[in-house]
Image: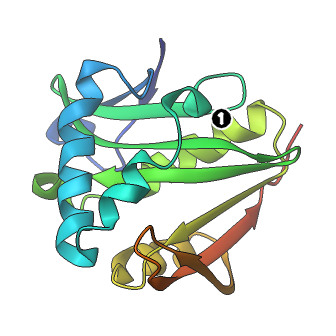
Amino acid sequence: MTLSRIPPDALDPTSVPVFEVRHLAITHPSAEPLLRELADEYGTRYGPLAGEEMRRFPAHEFDPPDGAFLLVFEDGEAVAGGAFRRYDADTAELKRIWTHSAHRRRGLARRVLDELERTARERGYAKVTLTTGPRQPEAKALYLATGYTALPDVVETGSDGAKFHLLAFEKTLTGAA
């Protein structure tokens, strides 16, 4: 497990919490509540086929050295997290970026993105890519605000044969190894 501290952005550091980032296995028990809420949210927004996305990649694909999974903790509680896996030799694919519903609008998703990008750079990736669903406008806004380039939609087919569109993005990692 790797730990790092993220100092809060505030004029008075005594009035805001300090967040702790832990790099863990995606199967770690601390991840379960956050991933369960993510699955529930996907189900609410996209219906029963959303569960396929959560089972799509084996857990080991998020393990080092090719992948990473991290959680942001506040006072011992996991409040946000995210992961990446190898997409190709130079590109990491970001997945499972999530902020607990009680902790949104605090900049935590941006912190998760920063940490995932930093870790991917350290692991030698030159670029990151990701997809998100069209019913997640807040995610699209975050990616565009943090320097991601929108790509053509990706069309995927669910197990029931239904086709659905995903919004695709990529970003070059400056200073990549």
Answer whether residue 108 is visible to the viewer in this image: no
Q: Is residue 60 above or below residue 120?
A: above
Across and down, in percent, residue 157 comes to: 53, 76
SS at mark 1 in the image: helix
Across and down, in percent, residue 156 comes to: 57, 76
What residue lies at 36% left-to-right and 33% top-to-bottom? 71
What residue lies at 41% left-to-right and 73% top-to-bottom? 139
Quarter of the picture holding the C terminus: top right
Q: Is residue 137 above or below residue 100?
A: below
Q: Which residue, given by chain and number where applicable, does mark 1 sit on?
A: 119
Picture quadrant where residue 134 is located? bottom left
The residue lying toward the viewer, choosing from 4 and 53, is 53
What residue lies at 85% left-to-right and 46% top-to-bottom? 175
Across and down, in percent, residue 74 comes to: 21, 32
Q: How is the image coloured?
A: rainbow
What residue lies at 42% left-to-right and 29% top-to-bottom? 26
Answer whether residue 158 is visible to the viewer in this image: yes
The residue lying toward the viewer, choosing from 118 and 58, is 58
Judged left or right of residue 65, residue 6 is left
Q: Residues within 10 Å of mark 1 (few under 14, many from 20)?
A: some
